[in-house]
Amino acid sequence: MHQMTLAEIARGLADKKFSSEELTKVLLARITRLDPQLNSFISLTEDLAIEQAKAADARRANGESGALLGAPIAHKDLFCTQGIRTSCGSKMLDNFKAPYDATVVAKLAAAGAVTLGKTNMDEFAMGSANESSWYGAVKNPWNLEHVPGGSSGGSAAAVAARLLPAATATDTGGSIRQPAAFTNLTGLKPTYGRVSRWGMIAYASSLDQGGPLARTAEDCAILLQGMAGFDPNDSTSIDEPVPDYSASLGESLQGLRIGVPKEYFSAGLDPRIAELIQNSIQQLQKLGAVIKEISLPNMQHAIPAYYVIAPAEASSNLSRFDGVRFGHRCENPENLIDLYKRSRGEGFGAEVQRRIMVGAYALSAGYYDAYYLKAQKIRRLVKNDFMAAFNEVDIILGPTTPNPAWKLGAKNSDPVAAYLEDVYTITANLAGLPGLSMPAGFVDGLPVGVQLLAPYFQEGRLLNVAHQYQLNTDWHTRTPTGF
């Protein structure tokens, strides 16, 4: 059962080959047995899962149907779940039980999805390796000595290890796509505003976006269908009709114009990954796509702009965690200032503290214009580059990451080296564009991903291209040894 995709589970439940309760119990037992070596979960919700599975079975018995009805999933631990710990991977929120469900959680629950638990993540989604979590690093199931990517590494590792078929995740600078590439999954960051951020604990509000992680594009289409849609509770939510993503998966790629930016193939890209990307391009050409070289001239400025904007927004968002209202509170504070200082010093880890300090500096008097305002101007230039490119091509293709997954601890002493791994992914967040990573091969036994970018609200186009690619390749079917 654990090898089934979401689509296969939906068909099996519809054909009464098994019940949601049976499947849920199998996967919960598998998580209990295998997850100690991965550390992909922060909380398991066995009682809730069995209750939801029984309810889903009852709904099917009454004639209801739906691709997510009875399907087991997990949520990244920054989506608020009523009555269940929502920690954001931080000591600061270790004792926080959300009093309400995030919109994503509520929508998927209404569709009948079964929540198996909350997955591990970089603290407050800040990281590219899932090593900054207060609950310990997550291991990559393809090689337990390597990182799974971050910040959604728990969701990625759990799905890659076949502990469950799919999971929710979030992407601020590549945190869905990079873990997908490192663990041989398909991961989609939707257009900014396509998926509600209400109840999703914020890192950088103008960049954060929730999305699906699964083994196939078909499964991502199913999960995104349940997540997407306008939410009046979220002021950044876009009131745009949600198409049937699964219905568009059969479209031909004949004549599809694919742009390949020349800036992607620089000295920083591992030549073995560059070769796999070229192989993917050739495969898409066989399916009828037309390849064109394009340019994104301001891409070189994206990383410095991102690492001003994101920390600036983080310093503002995380100011609410002060030891007064909720979250960690220090013991026996001498006064209010001592309460603030020690509660935040004890509750936040090193990476979060580093980004808060950078952000506070960038927003301070005398530096706002020099750093934050200039970074926002660069952001506009990055967006303009994409708009010009999409006048010529339908999608943009390139590597998801410049290197395969690195060893645990390899970049801990050099945070900037880890930041540079986001070079291909952060531009989509700066511009608010949808982006997808799909499996494209292996380097030294570690997975590699191809990234696809599309114009706003063209998630269906990305999913169709990935689906057609996966119908003609088998990279996404490979399973890590031991799982």
Image (cartoon, rainbow, N blue to C red):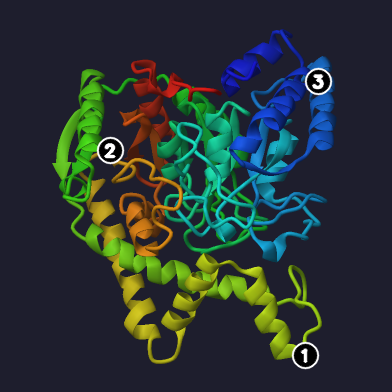
Residue 159 is at least partly visible in this image? yes
- The residue carrying mark 3 is 57
Name the residue nearer the viewer: 207 or 393. 207
Q: Alpha carbon of mark 3 to alpha carbon of mark 1: how far?
A: 55 Å
Task: Say if 87 sits above or below 156 in the image.
Answer: below
Sequence-earlier tag: 1 or 2:
1
Rounded to the nearest whole Å, what is the CA distance between mark 3 and mark 2?
Answer: 42 Å
The amino acid marked with disc number 2 is Asp
Q: Secondary structure at mark 1?
A: loop
Residue bearing the label numbered 1: 334
Q: Are marks 3 and 2 in contact (CB under 8 Å)?
A: no
Query: Dot 2: within a 10 Å radius of its alpha carbon, few (fewer than 14), some, or many (20 or more) residues?
Result: some
Q: Which mark is residue 394?
A: 2
Residue type at tag 1: Glu
Residue nearest the observer in this picture, 274 or 166: 274
Q: Horizontal placement of 275 versus 335: left or right?
A: left
Total marks in image: 3
Residue positioned 80% across, 34% down in the render? 46
Residue 267 image position (x, y, % from top left):
16, 50
Name the quarter where the N terminus is drawn: top right
Camera-near label (1 vs 2) is 1
Q: Position of residue 82 (x, y in %)?
A: 79, 50
The quarter of the displayed image where residue 108 is located: top right
| Amino acid beneath label 3 | Asp
Quadrant where the C terminus sits is: top right
Q: Earlier in the sequence, mark 3 or mark 1?
A: 3
